[in-house]
Image (tube, helix red, strand yellow):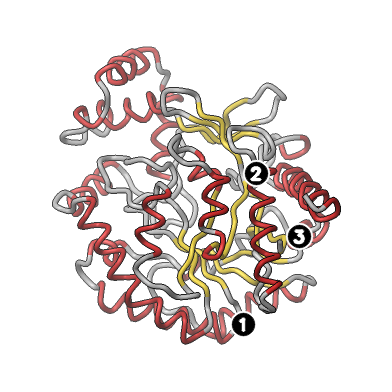
Amino acid sequence: MKQTWRWFGPDDPVTLAHVRQAGATGIVSALHHLNDGRVWPDDEIAKRKAQIEGAGLSWPVVESIIVHEDIKTRTGRYRELIDNYKQSIRAVARAGIETVCYNFMAITDWTRTDLDYVMPHGGTALRFDVVEFCAYDVFILRRPGAEADHPAERVTRAEAWLKQASESDLARLERNLIEWVPAREFVYDRQSLNRMLDVYNELSVEGFRANLFEFLREIIPVAEEAGVRMAIHPDDPPFPLFGLPRVVCSAADARALLAVAESPSHGLTLCTGSYGANPANDLVAMAREFGPRIHFAHLRNVKKEGDGSFHEAEHLEGDTDMVRVVQALLAEEARRKGEGRADWQIPMRPDHGHVIVDDIGKKVNPGYSGIGRLKGLAELRGVMRTIETLGY
């Protein structure tokens, strides 16, 4: 697989020189400063590409061109914004970028309650605690109908947690849930979040899924014409938050959305952490079943905690058999190569590394520390080399 690395641009604490030292050869990036639904200009894409290539790296994957909330709800300026999206697909294609990772999560991007969960080794990881989330949803945000969306036992535990929580606990929880999320168009406070939630009140899961499918029917032909592979990222976490609809959480969801268009430009990002947080998903089976439609892979692991909570585990630990997932992806690459395809290689990146060693105490983008991802990439590289060498 092509070993890539997510880079948030010139302000990223992890530099392009660091990426090369980690052994990655490709960059996964976006024009984050322009990611609000406007058309990406050719000159801005060229500028970012020149920065990356000047460091001796390539830019094979855009992650992400933001899907605006108006598109997801099919309200407001959605027609203009879909047209903008099509133009941005064509623009990245003109720059030679072949893959676009995107998601269709309502309001939220990936969400965690704790960005600094202390692990036994002394470093920190990302964690989602369902009790803390329930406490925020029911008792702090006071979303109408929230209590009915959580099991009664969880609401009781949430109320007990809230009684003993410190001011810093509450500030941390609100900051992580609504004030900070990477790659979002903007941040929220309680009032603006509730206003956005009102927009979704009348939109059912099936209605939201229909909006996704309509979006796909419009953009996939453009991507196919331009020679771009679209790779949808699953919902993270793979269950509803704030009563919002979730439609990319399971193998069944993946089958339904892939059936919308039998196109080589319509496929998946196999995020082993996002899908892996859903106990119903068998990641090895999914890698095998969806292999021909997997255009990009986020390789990370999670440890489920039994009540719906989970935390980010070491890349080769956790609940997903990462070795067999990698084996399935390499088998798919071999199949493509055997067909003589020039695009046989699947780009992958190590995702959500722990904060360890010299990164402790430094400014890092949560989930995107340098040393933790370097360690994960080295472990994954070792797995790939072993499988390729021994022919497993």
User: What distance separates the C-alpha of mark 1 from that of mark 2?
Assistant: 33 Å
Is 269 situated above or below 108?
below
Residue to which mark 3 is pinned:
24
Name the secondary structure under disc 3.
loop
The residue lying furthest to the right in this view is 389
Query: Sequence-wise, which precedes: disc 2 or disc 3?
Result: 3
Residue type (three-letter) at the residue carrying disc 1: Gly
Query: Sequence-wise, which precedes: disc 3 or disc 1?
Result: 3
Residue to which mark 1 is pinned:
96
Q: Is 75 positioned to the left or the right of 317 in the image?
A: left
Determine contact: label 3, label 1, CB under 8 Å: no
The image quadrant of residue 111 is top left
* Residue 242 in picture, x, y percent from top left: 28, 40
Q: Residue at x 19, y 51 (%)?
A: 204
Residue type (three-letter) at the residue carrying disc 2: Lys
Pick the residue in front: 385 or 129: 385
Name the secondary structure under disc 2.
loop
User: What distance separates the C-alpha of mark 2 from that of mark 3?
Assistant: 22 Å
The residue lying furthest to the left in this view is 202
Residue 363 tag number = 2
Residue 323 tag number = none
